[in-house]
Each structure stands twice: as structure tokens, then as C-alpha cells.
Amino acid sequence: MSGIVLLLIVLGLGALAFILARGKALSSVGGDQRALHSRPHYYGFSASILTIAPAVALMVVWGFGQSTLVQSSVAELIPASAIAEGQTVGLLMGDVQRIANGLDTAVAEGALSSDAAATLSTGADDIRGILGSVGVALGADVDPAILKAAQSYRAMQSSGATLRMIAVIGVALLGLTYGFMQTSATYRARNSVERSMRWTLIAAASVAVFTTLGIVFSVIFNTIEFFQLYPAKDFFLSLTWSPSFGGGSELGVFPLLWGTLYISLIALMVAVPTGLFSAIYLSEYASPKVRAFAKPLLEVLAGIPTIVYGLFALLTVGPLLVNVFGDGGILGVNWMQGGTAVMTAGLVMGIMLIPFVSSLSDDIINAVPQALRDGSLGLGATPSETIRQVVIPAALPGIVGAILLAASRAIGETMIVVLGAGAAARLSMNPFDAMTTVTAKIVSQLTGDADFASPEALVAFALAMTLFVITLGLNVIALGIVRKYREQYE
């Protein structure tokens, strides 16, 4: 039974619990709601929660536990002789799952009997033909050990699904019975429902916290594993980035950090002045009609996918810069050899970041109390002096937050870099040279069928951890600036 069907059954039992408990509460007082401690629907909701919540929780825990247990059990069945050179058990488990899913599909379509799928009575060549007929691609050889592991995987998954169905429906029925039995005129159903909702809200609020912790710990553990294979000194101090999955890699992060910061700096030099000046104009100078037209039009830039910006950088901005700064260009200099360069990605990324800075800064400037403006103008200051000496300092904490958001977006951008800046990891002060960033290399290192336990794959987590530390440092600095100016205006 699929998880969706099982969930629908649990929800149906929850609806039944609601009807039964509500009816029992009313019948216990002869239909007079005034004799009940809580309103009738609270009794129904209380029984429904007792029916649905434990069953759904069991489904989630069972799903994670069964997947881990089955994969570890099947992995132990794969002999060392079935693992070819350059392969890992993790890669073979992908083949095992694909074959097992193909066996299920073949049984469902009638191309293979359930008995044949559960035993080795069908040969590997026959299995190949059957799986090929249902669209499952296999390699040159089907190792009997892999086939046996796939059959074991399929059997364990089937048994686990059956046990899950029995356990989940059993827990739901127990919850329904308990909720129905405790329903009485004096039962504090409203208190029980409100308590359940409070815990539900706490759980929802905890999702972000636990997700963040999970991301951080997963990155940390894989980073530690990387530094056990590759020296940390060479990673942080080396000026060469030259990965080689055949061995002999040089994985110095400095060229990637330089490209990341260089492109981000150019992007912020474009986005911050333009976005801040546009926000000042829209909030302080523009008429209501102009603001109603210009602000939505400016925010349209935020809705454009980054891949479109990347194509714009590759097909328009890059060739335009070559025509100006390239060999035979308008200026007659030979600073730019190709369309992919730091300047190309920086300019386009800056355009992409303008609405982030402008929209947030506009809202923050509008939040400055009008009394501060009136007081400044009443003392004889001009509007421009009021904006420069009163409004902007008062809004500075929020503006710093907007700039920090733009910086974080610039540091984490990938598609514009890939299409606009190139893939060369180099140290250069020339903004018209092709470079790359940390995020682009994270994608490239995790793309393909490379051994996940190799330094060339694990380096992606070390790069991610480096970016995390950098952005954390930016947050600390921004927090210090915010506190400094907030003290002056409180």
C-alpha cells in the first residue's frame, strides 16, 4: 500500500473519530450543549488529533528508519567481488534500487511473475530483457550478486510496507478508541485541543532551527572528512586550483575566494548606489503617480530567473564589453579577450540586485518617523540636508541589512557566474579576465559519477563551509553597525 493511500485511510479514521466523539458528547447531555465543558466540535477535534497525530508521526519515523535499515542490510549482502575498481557500495546501491524498482514495474505490467521476481529462477539475461522492456537501463553485465541484492531489497521493502500499514492503522484505531472512550461531559476537550495546537506551532517553529542545524552539521562532518584526506594548510594557503579525479589534485581555495569577492564587489558597486538613490527618489521626491508606476516596474527585475540574467550576460553584455574594451574595439585597447569576464558577471549581477536594495531601502526610509523630517525642516534645513543628515542615518540599520542581503545573494549566485564569468580559477586584478567563484566550483565538483569519498568531491563541502564562515562574519560586522546607529536614535 502506498503512503498516500495509507495517509488517506488515517485521515478517514480521523474524520470518523470526529463524528463519533462529537455525537457521544452531545448524547451524554441529551443534546443540551450548555451542559458540556467545551463546545461539541472540540470533542471531535480532540479525538481526531489522537487518531491522526500518532499515526502520521509513526509513518514519518517508519519511513526514515525503514530506508536506512533496508539499505544497510542490503549493502551487507553485496560481496567484495561484485565491487569493481573505482566503484563504491553507494554507487552499487543505486543500481540495486533501480533494478528493484524495475522488478516491481515488470510485475505490475505482467512482464514478470511475482515468484520469478522473488527468486533467482530467472537468469540474468532474461532479467535484462524484461527490465529493458519496461525502460530500465542496465550496464553491460548484470552480476548475479547485484540481482540477488535487488531481489532482497524488493522483498524487504515489501515486508516493511506491509508492517507499516498494520502498525499505522493499528495506532490510528487505538487513538480513535481512546479518544472516544475519554469523551464525556466533564472532559476538558478545549484545553486538550489548544495544548495540541500549541505543540504543533512549536514544532512548526522548530523546523527552521533543526533544518539549519542539519545543514551545518552535515557540512561540518563532510568538511572534517575532507581535511582528513587533504591538508588544511594546502587548502587555505595554496594559490592553485587544479582538481584531477585521477589523483595529484591541487585544491587551493584562494583563487576561488578572490573571484567570488571580486565579482561580488563589482555587483555591489552597481547595485548599492543605484538601488539606494532610486529608493531615496521614490520615497522622498517622487509624486504618488510616479511612485505607483516606477516601484512595481523596478521590482519586476526581482522576478526574472537568474538563468535569464546569465543568458543576457553571455549574449548581450559580454559582446558589448568586447566591442568597447577588446582588440579592435571602440577604445582601441586589448584589455578583454572574450565575452566571459569578471566585469560581465559583475555588471549583470548588480542589475539583478538593484530591486533587493531599492525595495528594502524604500520600505525602511518610509518607516522613519515623519516627526524627524518635520523637526529638521522646522530648524531651517533643506530637504536634501534632511535626507542626508537625518533620514539616512535613522534608516541606516535597515539599509545595512538590505546591503547585506544583496551581498549574500551576490556571494551565493551561480548561473550568472557560470555563463558570464567563465570557469577559470585564477588570481588577477584585471576585471576583464575570466574567473570563477566558489559556488560555481561546488556545482562542478559534485557533478558526474566521481567517487563521493574522494577529496575532489568532498572539497565541495569545505568550500561551502568557507562561504558559511565568511557570511557569518559579514553578519557579525553588520550587527555591530546596526547596534551603533540604533543607540544614537533610540
Image: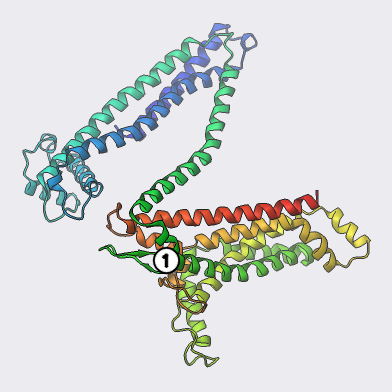
Query: Which residue lies at the image location 39% right of the left edge and 27% below the top edge?
Result: 58
Could you tell me if residue 465 is visible in this image? yes
Establish if 31 lies above or below 74. above
Q: How many marks?
A: 1
Identity of the residue furthest to the right in this view: 379
Q: Which residue is mark 1?
A: 238
Q: Nearer the viewer, residue 304 or 233?
A: 233
Q: Quadrant of the N terminus?
A: top left
- Residue 382 falls left or right of residue 351: right
User: Is 346 on the left or on the right of 234, as rendered?
Assistant: right
Q: Identify the residue at horizontal 70%, vertical 53% (top origin).
A: 482
Q: Is 245 placed above or below 458 here?
A: below
Residue at (53% x, 66% y) in the render? 261
| Rendered location of residue 245, percent (x, y) | 28, 62
Label 1 Cα crowd, 10 Å radius (few <14 / some 14-19 / many 20+): some
Which color mode does the image show?
Answer: rainbow
Give residue 64's quadrant in the image: top left
Residue 111 visible to the viewer? no
What x and y, as percent, mark residue 6?
35, 30
- x then y, percent, for residue 319: 47, 82
State the image quarter where residue 188 is shown: top right
Q: Position of residue 96 (x, y in %)?
A: 20, 44
Residue drawn where x is 19% and y is 33% of the image = 155
Q: Up-down: is 313 above or below 365?
A: below
Secondary structure beneath dot 1 equals loop
Question: Hey, which quadrant is residue 139 in on the image?
Answer: bottom left
Amino acid under disc 1? Ser
212 vs 67, nearest the viewer: 212
